[in-house]
């Protein structure tokens, strides 16, 4: 049992989902912590495997596969060294709207309607509005598809390496086919993915004027404000810039009361 527990505690979100689905359990709308709790409980109960589980690698491969004219087409995974033509020129980025995100979240991402109604309260949406998405690049693929990848500054520990976040788009219909992230909670719709998708919609809306793309003839790069955390060392702080009025004029409440009498 200890071996099972240790193995489960080291699993990423796709692996946990596969572990549970293989045992006939539903996995939608659960956090990483909740999935781990369910997996540990399934291990304790000794639930049998009903189907062959997949893993994080096959999950990534699955998200790189599309159906075109009733035939499956599998692109190189987004982190593949085969993809050598990444560019920060976003002129060919498909222009899509918020409704396209909502369709993806309700469909492939398996969000509930209740969760969708409160999407502005989601951490991912706040990451978008706070400017955590930057270094956006795209890579054109065959069959009218495009990869978009970006860096997402972490919600906490912002000085650490940002997460690589990505999505696969169908250019013709501005359709979000799949998405992912290198974070431990990657399930195709983690908060970093949500931040990327809403940031792309915001960028699209700002670069379209009366249904005419404004950056057709010139290089069009990411221009969203970037979230940065650049803390100063103590030796770099100028004491003369510190506010001292609060300290000099501080009067405890009970002292003020005594003065009034």
Image (tube, rainbow, N blue to C red):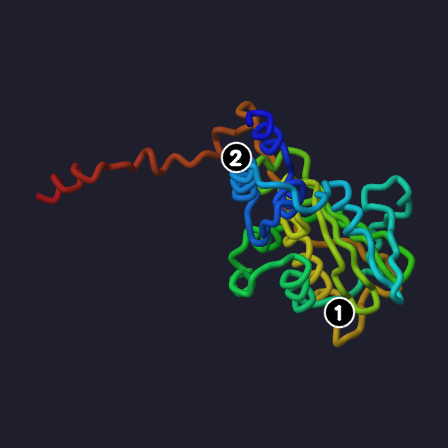
| Front-most of residues 61 and 116 | 61
Query: Outermost residue toward the top?
Result: 235
| Front-most of residues 202 and 224 | 202
- The crowding category of the residue bearing disc 2, from other C-alpha atoms within 10 Å (few below 14, some 14 to 19, many at least 20), is few
Q: Tag 1, which secondary structure? A: strand
Residue located 63% across and 63% down the image: 106
Query: Outermost residue toward the bottom?
Result: 210
204 over 165 or under it: above or below: below
Q: Measure how far apart labels 1 and 2 are at the Cα level.
A: 55 Å
Which quadrant of the structure image shows residue 164?
A: top right
Which quadrant of the structure image shows residue 162?
A: top right
Image quarter in which the N terminus is found? top right
9 over 129 or under it: above or below: above
Q: Nearer the viewer, mark 1 or mark 2?
A: 2
Residue 210, x across and y down, in percent:
75, 76
Which quadrant of the structure image shows residue 228?
A: top right
Q: Is residue 189 left or right of residue 146?
A: left
| Residue 44, numbered circle | 2
Per the image, the residue denoted by label 1 is 208
Asked if residue 133 shows in the view, the reply is: yes
Q: Is residue 173 left or right of residue 30?
A: right
Residue located 63% across and 49% down the image: 190
Query: Outermost residue toward the left?
Result: 261
Image quarter in which the C terminus is found? top left
Residue located 67% across and 57% down the image: 199
208 over 119 or under it: above or below: below
Mark 1 or 2, nearer chain start? 2
Q: Is residue 215 left or right of residue 188?
A: right
| Front-most of residues 7 and 195 | 7
């Amino acid at each position: 049992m200890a071996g099972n527990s240790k193995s489960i505690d080291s699993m990423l979100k796709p692996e946990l989902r596969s572990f549970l689905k293989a045992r006939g359990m539903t996995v939608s709308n659960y956090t990483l912590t909740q999935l781990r709790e369910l997996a540990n409980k399934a291990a304790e109960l000794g639930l049998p495997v009903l189907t062959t589980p997949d893993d994080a690698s096959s999950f990534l491969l699955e998200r790189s596969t599309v159906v075109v004219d009733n035939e499956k087409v599998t692109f190189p995974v987004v982190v593949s060294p085969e993809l050598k033509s990444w560019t920060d020129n976003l002129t060919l980025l498909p222009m899509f709207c918020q409704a396209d995100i909502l369709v993806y979240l309700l469909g492939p991402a398996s969000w509930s309607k209740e969760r969708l109604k409160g999407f502005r309260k989601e951490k991912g949406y706040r990451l978008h509005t706070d400017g955590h998405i930057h270094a956006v690049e795209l890579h054109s693929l065959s069959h009218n598809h495009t990869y978009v990848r970006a860096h997402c500054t972490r919600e906490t520990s912002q000085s650490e390496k940002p997460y690589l976040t990505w999505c696969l788009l169908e250019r013709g219909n501005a359709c979000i086919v799949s998405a992912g992230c290198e974070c431990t909670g990657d399930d195709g719709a983690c908060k970093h993915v949500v931040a990327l998708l809403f940031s792309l919609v915001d960028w699209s809306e700002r670069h379209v004027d009366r249904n005419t793309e404004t950056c057709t003839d010139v290089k069009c790069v990411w221009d969203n404000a970037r979230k940065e955390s650049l803390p100063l060392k103590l030796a770099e702080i100028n004491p003369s810039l510190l506010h001292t009025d609060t300290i000099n004029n501080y009067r405890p409440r009970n002292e003020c009361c005594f003065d009034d009498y």
